[in-house]
Amino acid sequence: MKFLRILLFPFAILYDFITSFRNFCFDKGILKSTSFAIPVIAVGNLSVGGTGKTPQIEYLIRLLSENYKVATLSRGYKRKSEGFVLADADSNAEVLGDEPFQYYKKFPQVQVAVDANRTNGIQQLLAQKNPPEIVLLDDAFQHRKVKADFYILLTAYSDLYCDDFMLPTGNLRESRSGAHRAKIVIVTKCPDTISLDEKSKIKSKLNLNSNQKLFFTSINYDNFVFSESAKISVDEIQKKDKVHLAGIAKPEPFFNYLKKEGDAVLKFPDHHDFSEAEILEIKAKANNKIIVTTEKDYVRIADKFSKEQLFYLPIKSEFMGDANVFDKSILNFIEEFPTK
């Protein structure tokens, strides 16, 4: 695979030229970006998948939804519906996509919508009888047709964008220079043992502008796994014979957190659409053992297993020592947002 990526280097150069030219056209106003009268916060990355966008969106929901009417707007990756959809009691993962449905299930106080056309999506949200005061754009760093007011760029500790290269040779969706649009850059999925010296080295490598702020976060796993009808402590579940199931990017930390010797591990591609045959195969391999999966996978397959067998492990994004500074940056931006 690595050799093939090297062979595709000329296509990476071409892709870099195309995306850079597109960004130039948006920066210069040749291509139109639409701005809105309410704050729009975009969370995204330069690379393909696995940077922790979902827990970061959830962090922002928790931060903002007590005092503001918040909506999330996603593309709805791999959903089977089309156009604009606003989540309601009849929605499921097939209609919304797994991550938006997860937001809807966890945060009933916010509006959750999907639309590949983010401009239309925001317009539809604002046309509701109860329009939002803030819109959170999920995975929209490259969606330049909307001019977000605040960009948050995520980059994984083990795969910094400054060490990467353009697709298909590397995993970057656009040039590293695209990072200049971000007001905040977050290095996600850091080990708990990261030192101040290592943070300093990463900051030097990223070479941010003076007006950009850098933060570091880790993934904080819950102390319990949950089903529709029960919960089990992590200490207890670690001792049990079980099956680990994940269809997410870079699932190794999830597997390692709960796994004991002898546990089965079933790994599928990110956003995997499980077939009936695969569900039957999973049940056969589990042989009535408990199955522990990720929260994102759970919302897609919960109805295919018994409540007693399938559990999920929630996660949160946790700032490493400077959460108050991040919170204040976001809240000040909202409070100072000009009325248009």
Image (cartoon, grey):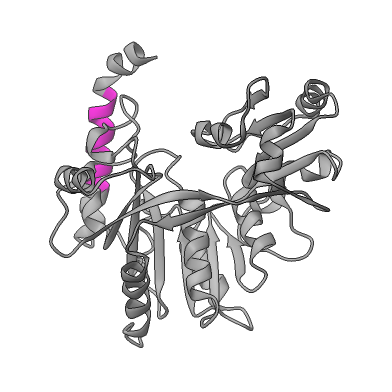
Q: Is residue 327 above or below residue 297?
A: below
Q: Is residue 62 above or below residue 193?
A: below
Q: How many marks?
A: 0
**Residue 144 in view in this figure:** yes
| The furthest residue to the bottom | 339
Left or right, 18 with respect to 34, comes to left
Q: Residue at x 32, y 85 (%)?
A: 338
Left or right, 25 with respect to 265, comes to left
Q: Main secondary structure of the magenta part?
A: helix
| The furthest residue to the top | 3
**Residue 118 in view in this figure:** no
Q: Nearer the viewer, residue 334 or 321?
A: 321
- Measured as percent of width and height from the top left, residue 28 is found at 19, 60
Name the quadrant of the C terminus: bottom left
- Measured as percent of width and height from the top left, residue 88 is found at 73, 66
- Magenta stretch: give its range: 11-22
Q: Residue at x 58, y 32 (%)?
A: 255
Image-quadrant location for residue 157? top left
Left or right, 32 with respect to 240, comes to left
Inspect the magenta stretch and tell me whether residue 16 lies in it: yes
Q: Residue at x 38, y 42 (%)?
A: 191
Q: Is residue 267 above or below residue 159?
A: above
Q: Nearer the viewer, residue 313 or 340?
A: 313
Q: Nearer the viewer, residue 295 or 119?
A: 295
Q: Residue at x 28, y 16 (%)?
A: 6
Name the quadrant of the N terminus: top left
- Measured as percent of width and height from the top left, residue 296 is found at 63, 46
Inspect the magenta stretch and tell me whether residue 266 lies in it: no
Left or right, 237 with respect to 40, comes to right
